[in-house]
Structure formats: C-alpha cells, structure tokens
Amino acid sequence: MKTFFEEKLKTSAFLGTLALISATSFLLVGCDKTTERIDAKTTEQPQKKPVSKNVIKVDETTETISDNKRIIYLTFDDGPNRGTENLLKILHKRNVVATTFVVGKHVNGSAKQKKDFADLQKDSLIEIANHSFSHADNRYSEFYKNPEKVVADFDSAQVLLGLNNKIARTPGRNIWRLNNISVTDISASKVAANQLQIAGYKLVGWDLEWRPTAKMSLKGNHQQMMKKVDSIFLNDLEKTSKHLVFLTHDQYLTDDESLAELDEFIDVLQKSKRFEFRKISEYPKINEILN
C-alpha cells in the first residue's frame, strides 16, 4: 500500500474514473436505485481537476494534510438495525470513531432497536445523523416526487432523534449538498435535494460503499476493499481531496465472516499509520453556512 501514495507524488496522470456506486436493497429498509440520468453540479467554487463530467472534485480544505496522510469517515446506514450491536463492538475493539445515519422509524421498531438507539446515543465513539424517518418506505422514485413530503419526513426524524446538527443522508440516493459540493446521482431527485438544502440540511453521500451479497453479508473481503481505498486516493476520485467517506450498513454485520472482514479492514487501515478516522461533522466545510 505504501507504493500507492509514492506513485501519486511522482505522477499526475489519472488512471480513469470509478463508476458511481449504486446502493442495493436490504433488510428492513434498503437502498434501491433505478437507472436514470445522472446530474452533478457544483456551486461557483474553485474546482480541482474534475475527473469526469459526473464526479466533481473539490480541494477546499483549510487544514494542511501531509502528502502521505488520508482521512477516512466510517459511516453506517439504517440503524438501529440487525448488526448495530456488533458494529459497536468492532468500533470499541479498534477504538475508532464513526457516524451512524439513523432511520427514525427504526428507533421504536422493537425493544431491541430501542435499546440499540439508546446505546448509540451514549457512545462517545458514535455520531448520530439523520437518514430520514421513513426511508421512503422503499418507494424511492415516488418519495422524491414530493419535495415537501421529503423535507417533512426529515424534519420528523430530526425531532425524534433529538439532533442538534442537520447533517443528513438521503435514502436510496448518493446525494451531496454542502456549501462547496452539489451532486445528484439521479436527476429526478434534484428538486427534493435542493429543498432539503434550503431547509438547512447538509446532505452527505459517500465515495466508497462496501456492498452486500444476496444473503445480506458483506461482499468480498478486506483486501479488496483496501485496493479500492488505494485506487480512490491514487486517482483523486474522492469528493474532497484526501478525504474519503466510506459507507456500509448495520444489517450486513450479522454473520461472523462479515464481522471479521470489517474488523480486519479497520485493523489494516490503522496499522498502515497513513489513515486517520473522523466523524462526519469534521468533514471539510460541512459546518459552514449553506448558500
């Protein structure tokens, strides 16, 4: 892995772009994308070498990060869910911070989910963010056709979850709305995303997703994920230079093999001493007032 960063210093050639990572269906409430036109734009901020017309690069950090250092934001969607308790065990074993994007209606879905949410609330390693109340009831295309309903849904979750920040992630969509990043993966969702931004929500998507198998376990292994991490940084495919937002879902963390692979993934990142873990509220410019 060391050679990847060394190569990046020696050459400015880009090796290509990554395909936009689509979400997939999952237990309780899942991500389900349809094939629609991609639309991505930025506000009028200086841009750094867009790698394609659909992936917008920004390098707007005020922090100086050394050439051999990278920031990883571990994020987990759809909690509290099957696997939430296992997630907390791994984070504490490795002593790393993470952000969990919680679905409002899951909080009171069962006695176990209610307990898991209470555990998330009191855990110093965890930051809770908004993933809507209903998760679109798995009907994403219909959900985003009604922007007012979308905003109301997020507002309901905001109150239920008792959140002070308005950091959020849209269900079934990889949408970004920060002061310096505006990306919409499926154009039919654009108006709803804009309305969420007007309502003050800071929408965070992801740069890399660890997707599931048909049996709802993590697909592949930690070595493959490390190669993807290296490739993103080597080719400058992260939305903000040197900052990578990683996504997977609580409900994929129920079998021993998946738990072992996530644990090994974090362990390898730590042992390399090239990566620092942060909560999503520390993402560059996320706390600036939106335009």
Image (cartoon, rainbow, N blue to C red):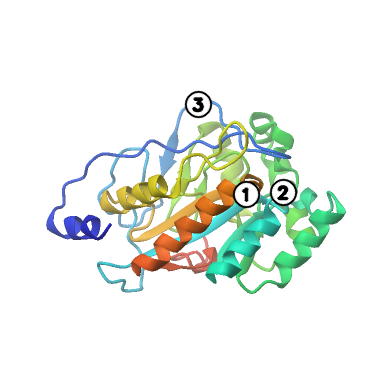
In space, the residues marked 3 and 2 are separated at their CA atoms by 31 Å
Q: Please give the label number shown on residue 36.
A: 3
Q: Please give the label number shown on residue 82.
A: 2
Q: Amino acid at mark 1?
A: Leu
In space, the residues marked 1 and 2 are separated at their CA atoms by 7 Å
Residue 105 visible somewhere in the drawing: yes
From the top left corner, tell me how far across and down residue 228 is, in percent: 36, 46
From the top left corner, tell me how far across and down residue 76 is, in percent: 59, 53
Q: Amino acid at mark 3?
A: Glu
In space, the residues marked 3 and 1 are separated at their CA atoms by 30 Å
Residue 166 visible somewhere in the drawing: no
The quadrant in which the N terminus is found is bottom left
Determine contact: label 3, label 2, CB under 8 Å.
no
Determine contact: label 1, label 2, CB under 8 Å.
yes
The mark lying in front, picked from 3 and 2, is: 2
142 or 134, nearer to the observer: 134
252 or 157, nearer to the observer: 252
Q: In this view, which residue lies farthest toward the right?
A: 111
From the top left corner, tell me how far across and down residue 15 is, in percent: 22, 42
Q: In this view, which residue lies farthest toward the front?
A: 256
Residue highlighted by disc 1: 253
Q: Amino acid at mark 2?
A: Arg
